[in-house]
Image (cartoon, grey):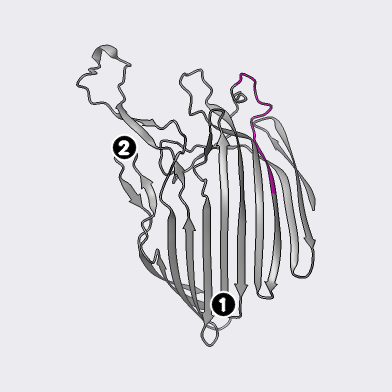
Amino acid sequence: EPGLRLHYYASQARLSVEPRIGLKYNVSNTIRLKAGAGRYAQNVVSTQNDLDIVNFFTGFLAGPEETIFQQGTNTPTRDRLQGAWHAVAGVEIDLKPNLRLNIEPYYKDFTQLITLNRNKLQARDPDFMVETGEAYGLDLSAQYELPNWLVWLSFSHAYVNRDDGEQVYPTVFDRRNNVNFLTTYSFGNQNNWEASLRWNFGSAFPFTQTQGFFQNVDFTNVLQTDVLTGNFPIGTILSTERNGGRLSSYHRLDLSLKYSVDFGKHSSLETNLSVTNAYNRENIFYVDRLTNARVNQLPFLPSLGMTFRF
C-alpha cells in the first residue's frame, strides 16, 4: 500500500513531500511478514527544560519563523521543519489458534530536530538550534485468549539519542526497557463479573545532574549591589554531560473487579472496584533541584465507582 502525503506549512512557506509505504505478506496461515517506511515532518517544537529533573509538563511552540543555522556553521538550513525517516519491520506468528506472537524492530532517523538553544549567551545568539538524532529498538508482544481469559504481555527495548553538535546524549524519554502485563478473567452465570490485573515496569529515565550552586548576583545596578552581604537567588550549575544521570525505575500494579447487570434492553449498571498501586511503590513524580525534595506519584489508592447507562 503506497501513499503520498503533501503538507503545505503556510507559516514556513514550505511544501513537505512525504512518501509512505506499507507491506504485508502472508507466508502461511500462521505466519505473516510486515514492513512500513515513510518520511515525516512537523512544525511543532518542544519546550522541555534541562533545569527540571523530571519533565512532567511539556509545552509546545509553533516552529520558528526566524533563520536557523546548520550545526556549527553560519549556513542557513534548507527549511525550518523537523523531519525524519521511519522504518519498521515485523512478523506475526500464530503459535496456536489462541496464542499470537508479534515481533517488530524499528529505526527512526531524525534528519533535522529544532530545539531551544541551551547554549545561548548573548542577545544576538539564535533562540533555536538544530540537532540530529536516531531512535531504534525492538518491540515484542504476545496475546493468549481463552473463552474466559485474556493474557497480554509486551516488552520493548529501545534507544533514543540526539546530537547537538557538541555531544551525543540520551533524550529525557530514553527508556531502555518497558514491560506491560495485563490479564482479565470473566466469570459468573452470564460472565457479568470481570477481574483484571495490570503490571507495568519501566527502567530509569535520564536527567542532567547537578554540579553545584552559586548566588546569582544581579549587577544591573552595580553601585547599589552589596556583593558581600546581599542575599541573592540561588543559581544552578549543571553537569557538562547532558542527561548523564538516571532516575530510579518505575513499576506499579493495578487491580480491578467489575460487575455488570442489565435492566432490559436499554439500561445497565456497572460497578467497579479498583486499587491503584496495590503494593504502594514510591515512584518519582517530581524532584526539586535546589532542595532535593522528592514528590512521589499516586500511593496505594482504592476507589469505587458506579455507572448507570440508559
237 with respect to 188 (left or right): left
Check whether the beta carbons of the residues at disc 1 and disc 2 lie within 8 A of each other.
Answer: no
Q: Residue at x 47, y 58 (%)?
A: 201
Instruction: Identify the element where label 1 is drawn.
Output: strand
Residue range of the region highlighted in magenta in the rendering: 73-87
Q: Amino acid at mark 1?
A: Trp
Compared across the picture, whether 89 is left or right of 60 comes to right
Mark 2: which secondary structure? loop
Outermost residue, top side: 223
Which residue is pictured at 33% across the width and 47% down the height? 294
Relative image position of residue 150 (x, y in whole percent):
57, 73
Q: Position of residue 68 (x, y in %)?
A: 60, 25
Q: Which residue is mark 2?
A: 290
Residue type at numbered disc 2: Leu
Name the magenta segment's main secondary structure: loop
**Residue 149: image tag:** 1
The residue sitting at 25% across, 17% down in the picture is: 225
Q: Nearer the viewer, residue 28 or 125?
A: 28
Residue 212 seen anywhere in this rendered image of the structure: yes
